[in-house]
Image (spheres, rainbow, N blue to C red):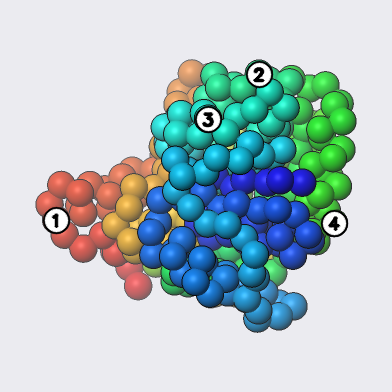
């Protein structure tokens, strides 16, 4: 397949490299000049539990520089950048192009469907960890899964084809007709671990250093799943709890994207994750005190840097 990755940060680069290793024609699209230049010059250094290697052969460029129409466009930009990013690749959206979003949070599907008919949009979640170590250098320790379906709920050939491509690349991908439950479960996972790491400066495994870390994570998970149920989504608390424990035990040294953003003084996805949950909770009268407190703490850290020119690193180390 001819595959373009829109947003070639840690996750986009991991997926692109895995797909390139599986024999696909991969183009990485991003605006990080240093990262793109390093990949063009030396390939992408990818460190996983399997090996430390350089993945060659991927094209790496800014979105406006790309001209080849992809069979599959995988969107990995931050949720708040989705509309601008999709507008920037409008020229790459051919009549047969399939768009897959594996972004965090809520709201991206609706935005993408403004550019591409729902029958050509795939939605899903992934639990793969990835860290951008430096320009042209990504690491991923531990494993994950991918679940996806068509945005309109129809079991189309594009779903099977995309699942097969990702699964053969070793990404443990399956079609899942109940992916909205998986999306809410992933939101619960992220609403717990991302801001907890962001405000404490902890890697995921460090959250398990004392019982308070997992306890607070589980409290947030319970709140988010209560909101999902208020929307009529049947979510599995045991599954999410197991995923949280798995991450804390095995994602050694992993800095979630929200922590990476805080350390780099970038805006986070807090509004698309905890913020979206809080908004939905208020509409349905569901109390989410822990989820809301973490949202407020991350917003304070962001504002401290943006409004006062101060260090955006977490309060605690």
Picture quadrant of residue 224: top right
Estimate the x, y position of residue 9 in percent, counting from the top left.
50, 56
Q: Nearer the viewer, mark 3 or mark 1?
A: 3
Q: Alpha-carbon distance for marks 4 and 3?
A: 29 Å
Residue 159 - label: none
Q: Residue at x 69, y 31 (%)?
A: 97
Q: Is residue 104 above or below residue 280?
A: below
Q: Earlier in the sequence, mark 1 or mark 2?
A: 2
Q: Alpha-carbon distance for marks 4 and 1?
A: 46 Å
Q: Is residue 242 above or below residue 43?
A: above
Residue at far front of view: 67
Q: Earlier in the sequence, mark 4 or mark 2?
A: 2
155 left or right of 37? Answer: right
Q: Which residue is mark 4?
A: 168
Q: Residue at x 35, y 72 (%)?
A: 317
Q: How many marks?
A: 4
Q: Nearer the viewer, mark 1 or mark 2?
A: 2
Estimate the x, y position of residue 235 in percent, counting from the top left.
73, 35
Q: Nearer the viewer, mark 2 or mark 3?
A: 3
Q: Which residue is mark 3?
A: 91
Q: Which residue is mark 2?
A: 117
Q: Residue at x 81, y 33 (%)?
A: 158
Q: Nearer the viewer, residue 44 or 250?
A: 44
Residue 309 - label: 1
């Amino acid at each position: 397949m001819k595959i373009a990755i829109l947003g070639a940060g840690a996750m986009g680069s991991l997926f692109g490299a895995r797909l390139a290793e599986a024999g696909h024609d991969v183009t990485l699209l991003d605006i990080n000049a240093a990262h793109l230049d390093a990949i063009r010059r030396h390939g992408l250094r990818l460190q996983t539990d399997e090996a430390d290697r350089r993945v060659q052969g991927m094209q790496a460029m800014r979105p406006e520089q790309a001209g080849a129409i992809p069979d599959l466009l995988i969107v990995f930009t931050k949720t708040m950048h989705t509309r601008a990013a999709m507008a920037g690749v409008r020229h790459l959206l051919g009549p047969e192009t399939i768009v897959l979003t594996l972004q965090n949070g809520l709201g991206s599907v609706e935005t993408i469907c403004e550019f591409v008919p729902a029958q050509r949009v795939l939605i899903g979640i992934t639990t793969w960890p990835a860290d951008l170590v430096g320009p042209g250098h990504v690491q991923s320790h531990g494993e994950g899964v991918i679940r996806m379906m068509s945005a309109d709920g129809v079991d189309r050939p594009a779903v099977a084809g995309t699942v097969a491509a990702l699964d053969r690349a070793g990404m443990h991908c399956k079609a899942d007709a109940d992916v909205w439950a998986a999306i809410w479960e992933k939101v619960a996972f992220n609403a717990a671990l991302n801001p907890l790491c962001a405000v404490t400066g902890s890697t995921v495994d460090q959250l398990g250093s004392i019982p308070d870390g997992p306890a607070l994570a589980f409290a947030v998970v319970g709140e988010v799943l209560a909101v999902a149920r208020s929307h009529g989504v049947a979510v599995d608390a045991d599954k999410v709890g197991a995923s949280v424990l798995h991450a804390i035990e095995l994602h050694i040294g992993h800095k979630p994207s929200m922590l990476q953003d805080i350390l780099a003084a970038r805006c986070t996805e807090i509004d698309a994750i905890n913020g979206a949950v809080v908004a939905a909770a208020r509409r349905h009268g569901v109390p989410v005190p822990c989820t809301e407190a973490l949202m407020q703490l991350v917003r304070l850290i962001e504002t401290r840097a943006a409004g006062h020119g101060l260090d955006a690193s977490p309060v605690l180390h």
